[in-house]
Amino acid sequence: MFLVMGMTGKVGGATATHLLTQGKKVRALVRDRAKAASWADQGVELVEGDWNDAASIKRALRGVDGAFVMLPPIWAPSPDFREAKGVIANYVEALTQVPVPRVVVLSSMGANRTGGMGLITALSLLEQGFRDLNLPIAYARAGGFFENFLYGFHVAQGGTLPVFYNPTDRKSTMVATNDIGAEIASLLSGPAWLGHRIIELGSMVSADEVAAQLGEVMKRDVKAIAVPRADWPDTFEQFGIPKGKSGPAETMYEAVNAGGMDLGVVGTEHVPGATSARDVFAAARKATAG
């Protein structure tokens, strides 16, 4: 039995799917059973609770062979990242009192840096918070998700894909969420290991390459266009971040553009992506058409 946190999200869902395909038993901690009904129909054991409650996490951990844990995605965190710190403290308490044979943590490229990373700071805090846990732990440092470009279907009809990557031909680590889920499932169910390890997930890809592959699926020429720095706050607001709260997201992309998510951090392993941006776009289009 494996615990998968965040199962109703992209990475948690991909992880659960891969584990179920392997014939493994899966458990999920959920706040709303109705939202996870489709998972229950596939045999997933649902435990009601919340990652803001250590007792709930302890209940979900009991008797599992491994656990996948992650932080809830928050695009407008408090300045002190108190939301992330609260969840991290709950995880540490739960894993200390209910230790499990192995833990896989969703982290991010750039989490090795302790400052200047904006939103990724939460994941740096997560890795730091787990540092003293005497358990086999694997930190899956994922690149930027290809799925984050799916907005392109709506905005690239005129042939341009606005991006925060600048210059657009500079490569940074990117990956499909399906590949992240596949690696996490492999780590949970595969050979055991000792101590802590860090795996970089993804391949070096540019925004120009992503735009070109989107164009192939849309059957039109699509070019990546860097959003002017002065326009970032308004653009983030269009993406749903409250006005005046986009600072952490802006800092993150500044760091990415400065090389903060490049592969090759000393002491890490590397698993390249097997799924291209083109594959992600094609699958999304097929799902919409279906």
Image (cartoon, grey):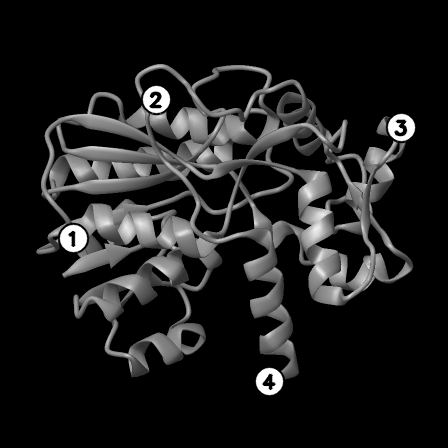
The answer to whether residue 214 is visible is yes
**Which callout, 3 or 1, points to the residue nearer the camera?**
1
The answer to whether residue 151 is visible is no
Give the mark nearest the N terminus, 4 or 3.
3
Quarter of the image with the C terminus in it: bottom right
At a point 12% along the width and 55% down the height, the residue shown is 64
Which corner quadrant of the image does residue 214 belong to?
bottom right
Which corner quadrant of the image does residue 285 belong to?
bottom right
**Which callout, 2 or 4, points to the residue nearer the camera?**
4
Picture disc at residue 290: 4
Would you call the spot at circle 1 few (<14 residues within 10 Å), some (14-19), or many (20 or more)? some
Asked whether, in this view, residue 235 is left or right of residue 33, the answer is: right
Residue that label 3 marks: 230
Q: Please provide percent x and percent y for residue 192.
A: 9, 40
Query: Rounded to the nearest whole Å, what is the CA distance between mark 2 and mark 4?
Result: 44 Å
Residue that label 1 marks: 189
Query: Rounded to the nearest whole Å, what is the CA distance between mark 3 and mark 1?
Result: 47 Å
Query: Rounded to the nearest whole Å, what is the CA distance between mark 2 and mark 3?
Result: 33 Å
Residue that label 2 marks: 128
Give the mark nearest the N terminus, 3 or 1.
1
Compared to residue 180, the image places residue 278 above or below, namely: below
**Which callout, 2 or 1, points to the residue nearer the camera?**
1
Q: Amino acid at mark 4?
A: Gly
